[in-house]
Image: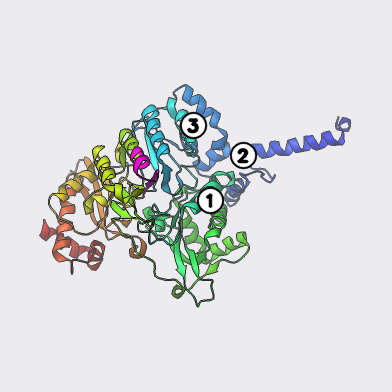
């Protein structure tokens, strides 16, 4: 029979057979000797290497190999038509589309977005509020990645939600699971008097680079990237897998003077690590290429068998920073630039309260307004009200921050009072106490099955209790997170509380509560907090925090001594004694 085919037909059949073999490999068939092809090849090859070394792919890698989530959209549409909740494998797959089914806490989806640098227009913000009303629970959450979540989306509304987001010119693609999450940047980019560089075009460029290259999807684990442009509001870039921190190179060190980004890698505060300075500096127009090379080395070297060890931190632990950077340079071609510490000018410091209140912009007679939110929660009506204020009084932008609030930018100084009155009229404010301004909380067990405690409610209770009893006169960060995943980054708070079930008797009964840590920090004061108390019942947490704050006020060396400096000056036993005296 073979002799009956023309040469052209033979080539066609050979190509078909080759494609069929590659297709079988992508769909989970036993690995063959055929070389994988296509955008997923880099991931399939990494999986094959893990198996060849005697490893066993973890369940999520098997799911990705069996059917790539981006190839399964038709089944998501079918499930929506039937109002069907996803099976576990599809619950993982649909996260590639930004959808997280959060049962049993809520029998519905949460939708996570991609908003590069956290900036969106007033009409996009209002449109999301409309989608939350139409397909969700009627509210939005501002997250600790300067992003938004929409919750309580029934399965039947899942597709309408993500397609509605796309209709607004926004994105959910790759917003969850083993992908590069929303690219964070300085919220005051382009309007900040002290910034070194506007991060918006850089975050946008990397955002679109990721969206348009499927080979950058399906990493060994999730991946965070942030740009800090040197502005007044912290981006917490040192908590990210890749941290680009703007710096200025001065003359006299064999480098072209100007603004570069210092490169730090491997931040993951839930695992007690801030990003490590590499000694590398990157010209702004090369950050996308450098990030791409780092990502591809991570794809090739990350753990596909043990998800607990799959983040970039563990690759760096295993290979060492120098060997990892050597692999990155092999991808790039030219060597990475290095700069000695003395070549770097001192960076401007953060203002820990600049995300709240009225602040002058670099543009003459313009200000940004930092609006305080209730632990990131915003009703749809409030969101539409803020969108209208941004349109009528500002430059039309809404800027999200990692502090779970937002800014309205470009307000003429002559109209600031009028804009503030409108914000008050919709039930919000640009004022907050030092305790409220630095209060951060994850979703908690109301909306997350991993959380042990109702973090947002308990955070509000702590703030209300302490505000009435302690006159804090300095910036303070209190972070409550519901579980060890540390979405609220409790280890970098002045005071951090991580959810726990607290035993109350010998019969095994428990109540909601926390382990308490102190002394964390970020940026120039970066540090991982240490544990102070275990098993504090949620009902006791407000009084315990009050006593800690009283001890600080009574024993700080000067009024300028920060809370973190005070706690780092004392060992754990000494702090406990001072707290006991204050109770």
Determine whether 5 is above or below 420 in the image.
above
Q: Position of residue 193 (x, y in %)?
A: 38, 60
Residue 20, placed above or below residue 327? above
Image coordinates of residue 355 in percent, x first then y, are: 31, 52
Q: CA distance from mark 2 to mark 3?
A: 27 Å
Residue placed under numbered mark 3 in the picture:
163
Residue identified by numbered label 2: 26
Q: Sequence order check: which comes first, mark 2 or mark 3?
A: 2
Q: Position of residue 477 (x, y in %)?
A: 27, 55
Secondary structure category for the residue under label 2: helix
* Range of residues picked out in magenta: 387-401
Q: Would residue 502 be seen by someone viewing this image from the given angle?
A: no
> Does the CB distance between marks 2 and 3 fall below 8 Å?
no
As helix, strand or loop, the secondary structure at mark 3 comes to: helix
- Kindly state the secondary structure of the residue where label 1 is placed: helix
Pointer 3 or 1: first along the chain: 3
Q: Earlier in the sequence, mark 2 or mark 1?
A: 2
Q: Residue furthest top?
A: 82
Q: Quadrant of the N terminus?
A: top right
Residue 73: quadrant of the picture: top right
Q: Nearer the viewer, residue 315 or 258?
A: 258
Asked whether residue 233 is drawn in magenta, I would say no
- How far apart in space, not on screen, are marks 2 and 1 (Cα)? 29 Å
Q: Position of residue 274 (x, y in %)?
A: 39, 59
């Amino acid at each position: 029979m073979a002799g009956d085919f023309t040469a052209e037909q033979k080539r066609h059949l050979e190509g078909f057979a080759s494609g069929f073999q590659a297709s079988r490999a992508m769909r989970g068939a036993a690995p063959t000797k055929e070389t994988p092809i296509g955008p997923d090849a880099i991931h399939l090859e990494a999986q094959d290497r893990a198996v060849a070394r005697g490893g066993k792919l973890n369940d999520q890698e098997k799911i990705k190999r069996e059917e790539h989530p981006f190839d399964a959209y038709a089944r998501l549409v079918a499930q929506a038509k039937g109002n069907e909740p996803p099976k576990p494998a599809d619950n993982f797959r649909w996260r590639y589309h930004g959808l997280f089914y959060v049962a049993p806490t809520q029998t519905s989806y949460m939708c996570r977005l991609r908003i590069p640098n956290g900036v969106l227009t007033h009409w996009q913000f209002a449109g999301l509020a409309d989608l939350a009303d139409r397909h969700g629970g009627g509210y939005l959450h501002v997250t600790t990645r300067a992003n938004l979540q929409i919750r309580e989306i029934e399965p039947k509304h899942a597709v309408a939600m993500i397609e509605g987001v796309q209709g607004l010119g926004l994105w959910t693609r790759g917003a969850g699971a083993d992908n590069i999450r929303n690219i964070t940047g300085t919220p005051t980019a382009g309007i900040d008097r002290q910034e070194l560089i506007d991060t918006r075009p850089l975050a946008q460029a990397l955002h679109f680079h990721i969206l348009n290259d499927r080979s950058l999807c399906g990493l060994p684990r999730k991946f965070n990237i942030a740009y800090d442009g040197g502005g007044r509001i912290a981006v917490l870039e040192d908590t990210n897998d890749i941290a680009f921190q703007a710096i200025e190179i001065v003359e006299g060190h064999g480098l072209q003077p100007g603004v570069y980004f210092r490169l730090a890698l491997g931040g993951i505060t839930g695992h007690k690590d801030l990003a490590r300075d590499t000694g590398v500096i990157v010209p702004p127009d090369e950050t996308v290429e450098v990030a791409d090379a780092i990502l591809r080395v991570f794809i090739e070297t990350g753990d596909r068998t043990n998800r607990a060890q799959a983040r970039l931190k563990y690759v760096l632990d295993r290979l060492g920073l120098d060997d990892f950077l050597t692999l990155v340079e092999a991808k790039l071609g030219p060597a990475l630039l290095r700069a000695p510490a003395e070549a770097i000018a001192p960076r401007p410091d953060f203002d820990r309260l600049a995300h709240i209140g009225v602040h002058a912009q670099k543009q003459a007679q313009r200000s940004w307004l930092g609006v305080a939110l209730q632990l990131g929660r915003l009703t749809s009506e409030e969101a539409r009200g803020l969108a209208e204020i941004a349109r009528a009084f500002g430059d039309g932008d809404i800027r999200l921050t990692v502090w779970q609030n937002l800014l309205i930018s470009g307000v003429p100084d002559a109209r600031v009072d009028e804009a503030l009155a409108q914000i008050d009229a919709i039930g919000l404010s640009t004022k907050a106490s030092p305790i409220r301004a630095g209060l951060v909380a994850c979703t908690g067990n109301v909306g997350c099955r991993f959380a042990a405690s109702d973090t947002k409610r308990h955070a509000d209770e702590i703030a209300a209790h302490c505000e009435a009893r302690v006159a804090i006169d300095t910036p303070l960060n209190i972070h409550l997170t519901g579980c060890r995943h540390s979405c609220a980054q409790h280890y970098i708070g002045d005071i951090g509380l991580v959810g726990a079930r607290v035993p109350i008797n010998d019969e095994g009964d428990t109540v909601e509560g926390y382990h308490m840590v102190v002394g964390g920090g970020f940026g120039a004061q970066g540090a991982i907090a240490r544990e102070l108390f275990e098993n504090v019942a949620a009902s006791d947490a407000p009084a315990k925090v009050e006593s800690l704050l009283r001890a600080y006020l009574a024993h700080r060396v000067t009024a300028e001594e920060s809370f973190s400096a005070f706690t780092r000056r004392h060992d754990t036993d000494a702090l406990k004694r001072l707290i006991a005296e204050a109770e």
